[in-house]
Amino acid sequence: MTDADGLDILVVGGGITGAGIALDAATRGLRVGMVEAQDWSAGTSSRSSRLVHGGLRYLLKYSDLPQLAESFREHAFLVDALFSDFRLVAESLKERGLLLDSIAPHLVTAQPFLWPLRQRVIERTYSAVGVGLYDALALLGNRKKTVPFQHHLSREAAIETFPDARSDSLIGAIRFYDARVDDSRLVLTLVRTAVQYGALAASRTEVVDVTHDDGGRVNGVVVVDHETGAQHAIRAEQVINATGVWTEKTQALADTDAGLRVLASKGAHIAVPRDRIRGKTGMFLRTEKSVLFIIPWPDYWVIGTTDTPWHEDLVHPVATSRDIDYLLEHANSVLSSNLTRDDIIGTWAGLRPLLQPGTKDASKTAKISREHTVTRVADGLISIAGGKLTTYRVMARDAVDFALGARARSLPSVTERTPLVGATGLEALKRLAPRIGATYGWDERRMEHLLSRYGSAIDELLHLVEADRTLAQPLAAAPSYLRAEVAYAVTHEGALHLEDVLRHRVRLAFETRDRGVGALAEVSAIMAPLLGWDEAAREGEEASYRRAAESRDAAELEDTDAAAAAIRLRGGDIVPVTAGR
């Protein structure tokens, strides 16, 4: 980041919340900067269930009417909780609709799910009420239908829709819709859009101190550029801490005990090949703890998630043997596929920032919603935490409104009407897709893949191909991706290292059995001339990636978080960071 003195707002954290804040502030005409200690989306925002959803589970507890009535008689405060949950779900469904319809229609895809039913009358009735409320709130929030409404299926119809559903696990099903998204791509596109509107952005740039003026007011930060080792001071009128599970550690840099309390909860996921499960939809399951999703992607299925406390290193949460067994057991309870560990091609674990009630200092001002809170930690320093990927735009709006105070009325958010890079002109590009594909020898599936990742920004990728026709070819070790996508990750998406490409852009780290190791030589050969790597640098990148992949493989054999985390830490990083340690 250069020329950063005199910022109106500096955002600390380059996940979904930080990127959303940077875009919101930039589109209000503010001078904005954003820094991230690792790669963009490297924390929670690249390790989610990859869903854009309204939160159906919040409504299900209100659909069993007799039990609900009894609860209300015993606990009057549940009335407030009911309306709070309804508002939360309505808000999330509105955001889902905006993303599907106008903000990011190239990235966000409507996804049908089956909800298996086990009881013929009671469960089908209260489930229909819950899903019906879900559909109604979605329609009210968007004023038009962005996904189909629920549809009830008999056992036979459910099995026809999802042939691998165990016939003894259901008596029928409800088909409903949510949406899916590549979480990292959404963050990267938000960052790119923010920069397009004037934001300054620097990854691999860690905040190591918070600075104050002579009056004690926070007036900026000191950062370390992990690529060069150089330190820089960045001045800003307001600093917004959007670091998720690192919230308390970032607050502590300001020499204050005030702010938000955030706990980390681990959510683990596994991926299995697409042909290993026969189904035309996803599947939604209620478990003894929460819910489980089985989500189809073009080449694989995602199964997740868990929900367990995490007390280890924040940089590298890992799936343990116990996590994997849990996911397989619950999936196999409704699938005839009989999935085993040998079927797993990828795993990941992310940390949810669970916001604790209140603030550390009750005297500090705060804006508190059902799932996220914005508070003034100190004069000049604001923290925001909680929320979820789906409502990132609302969180961003609230954070910038809070920073602006009374000025927000005359400078309102416009992100509800701001398409992300690649969204504008998408329908026209879809009609041109056959012609583009014929020019470069790409079939219909390849064009669908490219448009779902780049949208109308595919023209930028085509410019790279025109300059070097070898980039039009698929990766030999991973033919789902083009060589051009690796180059584009460097030239347009800020990738600086092999792991940046393989974990957050060309996502072989999660989609292949060897975590992308088989593609290292080819990927690094494409990246090397673009980043000025000599042979030693290239070998170092490959060796570092191999060590990290091997440590993750070994960690998955452990039952406990502590043992698994210790093994992963021994694998090291190509660019070590101190965040979370």
Image (cartoon, rainbow, N blue to C red):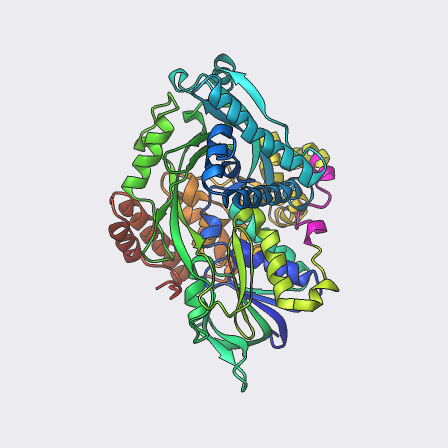
Please determine whether, in this image, residue 27 is positioned above or below residue 90.
below
Whether residue 485 is visible here, answered yes or no, is no
**Foreground pick, 559 / 206:** 559
**Foreground pick, 418 / 386:** 386
Occupied quadrant, residue 450: top right
Residue 458 image point, x, y percent: 65, 45
Residue 419 image point, x, y percent: 69, 49
Whether residue 379 is visible here, answered yes or no, is yes
- Which residue: 68% across, 37% down? 140
Residue 162 left/right relative to 395: left
Total marks shown come to: 0
**Foreground pick, 357 / 432:** 357
In the image, farthest residue toward the bottom: 214
Say if the magenta span includes residue 89. Answer: no
Residue 252 image point, x, y percent: 42, 71
**Quadrant of the rendering where the N terminus is positioned:** bottom right
- Which residue: 38% across, 36% down? 345
Occupied quadrant, residue 442: top right
Residue 147 image point, x, y percent: 64, 32
Residue 423 left/right relative to 270: right
Please determine whether, in this image, residue 213 is positioned above or below residue 530.
below
In the image, farthest residue toward the front: 73
- Which residue: 72% across, 63% down? 409
**Quadrant of the rendering where the C terminus is positioned:** bottom left
In the image, farthest residue toward the top: 156
User: Which residues make up the magenta segment?
Assistant: 415-430
